[in-house]
């Protein structure tokens, strides 16, 4: 089911007695979510991710704009009639009911032509449990389950009606690191098997990049960039997106372009044909550094972190926004740990230039 958000704006009344202006959580937001895709809404707290999800679900009504499921305008359709499945961060299971009863609950509330026989409900519950691999837990109650198992029950309950759209609101936040990794892989597997259009809300860019077909980067209620995870990582449209994606984070330097040459401090980095003279922010991905005795960029050496296949050189530079610069290179490189200076050449494809004021990307080509 294709989902289209058309010029959505959502405002909430101000809680301040002095300030009467409403609080705008979403600004003129337009997005098309392809049929059968898994799309991640990604951004920091307060950026409008959950508001967008709640508008899609029908739990909130937009101040203006429209929501379409396929060609059907569902803007004013109640949540219970939209055909959505919703999974919350806190699982929201009924503690007094068994796993089976929790999964059956949405089916038991069907009425009219949609009402199912007891046998049909049991078959659907069994199929949903099998899909999330909890068949052996059907007689247990939520307090007898681990966090990961409870999340699977919540997903099974959302899937049992085979919704048109599945909505996941920070579903992994309450799990430990190992469970998060395993559960996000399960979410991807389930989505691929069911082909249900899925919207996944998270502030964790690793989660979004690892399982989503597309990610939507948001900030302060506005859409910053939409695309495939690797495409956005390789081609951020602005400094905010570049900073938000990537672990370790991108290294950002104050720089200047003069006579079509890029400088960080007094270090000439490389030619940037066609770029006019201006102050810039220079973003360098950690994997964009090449250790070189005669490298163009000079940094103050601090130490080395061994990561197995790779090593991370820790350094500083007076022009860096980052307190510590992390440069990931192959462990085959030999680092002179006795020197106070480390020098690098840079991979042009891993270097991004942003306008010093607007922080918008400045594209350049390297000969």
Image (cartoon, grey):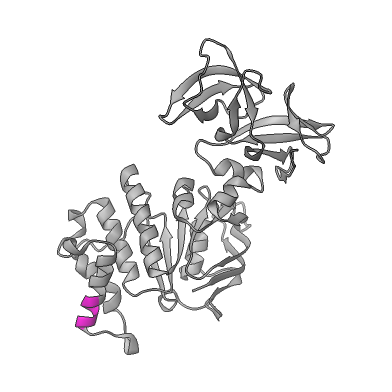
Residue 61 in view (yes/no):
yes
User: Which of the 4 image quarters holds residue 167?
Assistant: bottom left
State the residue lying farthest toward the top. 338
From the viewer's perspective, is residue 130 above or below residue 148? below
| Residue at image point 29% right, 59% down | 152
Where, by quadrant of the figure, is residue 92 drawn? bottom left
**35 in the magenta segment:** no
Give x and y (percent) for residue 245: 54, 44
Which residue occupies the foreground of this view, 40 or 339? 339
Q: Is residue 174 among the parts visible in the rendering?
A: no
Q: Give the image location of residue 302, x and y in percent.
A: 52, 17
186 vs 65, nearest the viewer: 186
Give above or below for 300 relative to 307. Answer: above
x and y percentages locating residue 79 in the rendered image: 44, 74
Residue drawn where x is 38% and y is 55% of the image: 171
- Write the start and end of the magenta stretch as one range: 118-123
Q: Magenta: predominant secondary structure element? A: helix
**Extreme residue in the bottom direction:** 113
Q: How many marks?
A: 0
Q: Position of residue 315 (x, y in %)?
A: 56, 21
- Screen quadrant of the C terminus: top right
Taking depth in this image into account, of 217 and 267 the one nearest to the observer is: 267
In this orientation, which residue lies closer to the viewer: 191 or 78? 191
Figure check: 74 above or below 353? below
The answer to if 122 sits in the magenta stretch is: yes
Residue at 36%, 74% (x, y): give it: 162
The image quadrant of residue 12 is bottom right
Residue for point 29% across, 79% down = 109
């Amino acid at each position: 089911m294709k989902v289209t958000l058309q010029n959505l704006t959502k405002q909430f009344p101000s809680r301040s007695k002095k300030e009467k202006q409403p609080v705008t959580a979403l600004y003129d937001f337009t997005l098309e979510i392809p049929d059968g895709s898994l799309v991640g809404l990604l951004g920091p707290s307060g950026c409008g991710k959950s508001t967008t999800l709640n508008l899609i679900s029908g739990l909130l009504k937009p101040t203006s704009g429209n929501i379409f499921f396929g060609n059907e305008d569902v803007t004013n359709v109640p949540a219970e009639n939209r055909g959505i499945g919703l999974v919350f961060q806190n699982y929201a299971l009924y503690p007094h009911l068994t796993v089976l009863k929790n999964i059956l609950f949405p089916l038991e509330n069907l009425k009219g032509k949609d009402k199912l026989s007891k046998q049909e409900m049991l078959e659907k519950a069994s199929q949903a449990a099998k899909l999330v691999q909890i068949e052996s837990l059907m007689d247990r109650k939520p307090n007898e389950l681990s966090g990961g198992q409870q999340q699977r029950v919540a997903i099974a309950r959302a899937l049992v009606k085979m919704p048109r759209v599945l909505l996941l609101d920070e579903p992994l936040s309450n799990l430990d690191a190992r469970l998060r990794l395993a559960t996000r892989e399960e979410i991807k597997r389930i989505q691929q098997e069911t082909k249900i259009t899925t919207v996944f809300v998270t502030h964790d860019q690793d989660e979004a990049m690892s399982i989503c077909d597309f990610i939507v980067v948001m900030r302060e209620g506005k859409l910053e960039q939409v695309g495939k995870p690797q495409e956005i990582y390789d081609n951020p449209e602005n400094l905010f997106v570049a900073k938000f994606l990537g672990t370790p984070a991108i290294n950002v330097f104050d720089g200047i372009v003069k006579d079509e040459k890029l400088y960080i401090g007094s270090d000439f980095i490389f030619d940037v044909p066609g770029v006019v003279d201006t102050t810039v922010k220079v973003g360098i991905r950690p994997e964009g550094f090449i250790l070189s005795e005669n490298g163009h960029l000079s940094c103050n050496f601090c130490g080395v972190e061994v990561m197995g296949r790779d090593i991370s050189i820790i350094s500083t530079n007076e022009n860096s926004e980052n307190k510590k610069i992390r440069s990931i290179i192959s462990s085959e490189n030999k680092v002179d740990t006795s020197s106070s200076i480390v020098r690098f050449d840079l991979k042009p494809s891993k270097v991004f230039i942003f306008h010093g004021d607007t922080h918008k990307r400045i594209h350049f080509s390297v000969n």
